[in-house]
Image (spheres, rainbow, N blue to C red):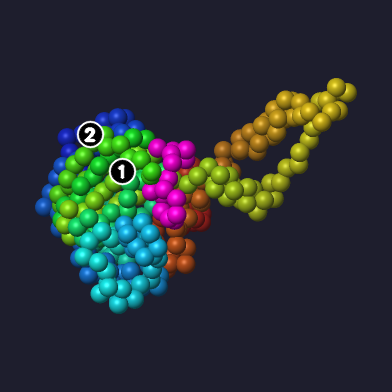
């Protein structure tokens, strides 16, 4: 299969150097004559399944603004939904719909093990998940209808959020840019950029998201891996002097801890093996066989599949 460029007039090199994890990019007609692989009814059908992660976001619910409900859902809920201002989101649609999975090779200018999944969302007019930001890269491909995207400033964990909702909705949102996306148009957003997408009419959007674990999660997993392999090391003091026998912690102790942690991670073979396992580990390990999960990576001639080292 010949994969067309989805970056418009940009070369891969230009995109990676100027936009990737730096600034948004709107690509008109990235997928010419695009036809959505899913219909709204088919997406709703997926949300009924126990194995599928899904949720519905209401801008105004019984418990207040920005209400969140988790699936799996019963068919009866769709007969009770309002005519506007809600969104259905289904994670990992690429695991269940081959035509959705077929979108991923178009992003072959990025490491395949960086891809997390393809989330598909449906919303009637006015539907959205509110102004927010993410910690990961995402390509937002318009599949059906039109969605108005407003782009704001960069945010971080210090950005004030609305209270009283499990959703991370920004308290303030200053619009920097605004576009209406048509089917086949695509918007790239780097981590941290605030955004708000509101459906103009019945609307399907495909979100190709990229894995971006927190460093604390990575360190936690690395520690577990080191313990599993019997690589436990024990703290030892730096050279002591009588003047260090006080309640005050001398800077030398901190430098010692830094040096010991640094030494533990200097084994590049060990670190590479752990990183390949970590980044190829399936998001839903219980679905590896049922959903034909195939996350692969290689490093220094070693091959990894779904979090395990394998023969080629």
| x and y percentages locating residue 184 in the rendered image | 16, 50
Residue 21, given in percent of the width and then of the height, sits at 36, 36
Q: Residue at x 47, y 38 (%)?
A: 158
Q: Nearer the viewer, residue 59 or 136?
A: 59
The residue under label 2 is 11
Whether residue 164 appears in magenta in the rendering, the answer is yes
Total number of numbered discs in the rendering: 2
Which secondary structure dominates the residues rendered in magenta? loop
Rendered position, 103 above or below 252? below
Left or right, 120 with reference to 5 = right
- The kind of secondary structure element at disc 2 is loop
How many C-alpha atoms fall within 10 Å of the one at disc 1: few (<14), some, or many (≥20)?
A: many
The residue most toward the left is 33
**Helix, strand or loop at mark 1:** strand
Residue at the spot of label 1: 195
Is 13 magenta? The answer is no
């Amino acid at each position: 299969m010949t994969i067309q460029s989805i970056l418009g007039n940009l070369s891969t090199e230009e995109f990676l150097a100027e936009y990737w994890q730096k600034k948004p990019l709107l690509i008109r007609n990235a997928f010419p004559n695009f036809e959505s692989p899913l219909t709204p009814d088919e997406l709703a059908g997926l949300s009924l399944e126990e194995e599928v992660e899904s949720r519905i976001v209401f801008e105004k619910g019984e418990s207040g603004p920005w209400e969140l409900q988790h699936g799996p859902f019963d068919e009866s809920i769709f007969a009770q939904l309002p005519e506007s201002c809600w969104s259905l989101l289904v994670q990992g649609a690429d695991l269940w719909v081959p035509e959705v999975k077929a979108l991923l090779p178009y992003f072959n200018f990025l490491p395949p093990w960086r891809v997390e999944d393809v989330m598909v969302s449906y919303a009637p007019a006015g539907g959205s998940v509110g102004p927010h930001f993410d910690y990961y890269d995402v390509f937002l491909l318009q599949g059906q209808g039109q969605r108005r995207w407003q782009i704001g400033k960069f945010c971080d964990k210090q950005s004030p959020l609305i209270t009283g909702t499990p959703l991370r909705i920004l308290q303030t949102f200053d619009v920097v840019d605004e576009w209406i996306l048509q089917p086949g148009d695509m918007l790239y957003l780097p981590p941290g950029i605030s955004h708000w997408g509101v459906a103009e009419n019945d609307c399907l959007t495909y979100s190709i998201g990229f894995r971006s674990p927190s460093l604390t999660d990575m360190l936690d997993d690395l520690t577990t891996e080191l313990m599993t392999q019997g690589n436990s090391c024990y703290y030892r003091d730096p050279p002591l002097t009588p003047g260090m026998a006080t309640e005050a912690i001398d800077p030398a102790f901190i430098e010692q801890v830094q040096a010991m942690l640094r030494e533990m991670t200097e084994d590049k073979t060990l670190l590479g093996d752990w990183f390949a396992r970590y980044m190829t580990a399936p998001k839903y390990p219980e679905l590896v066989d049922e959903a034909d999960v195939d996350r692969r990576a290689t490093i220094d001639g070693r091959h990894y599949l779904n979090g395990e080292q394998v023969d080629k």
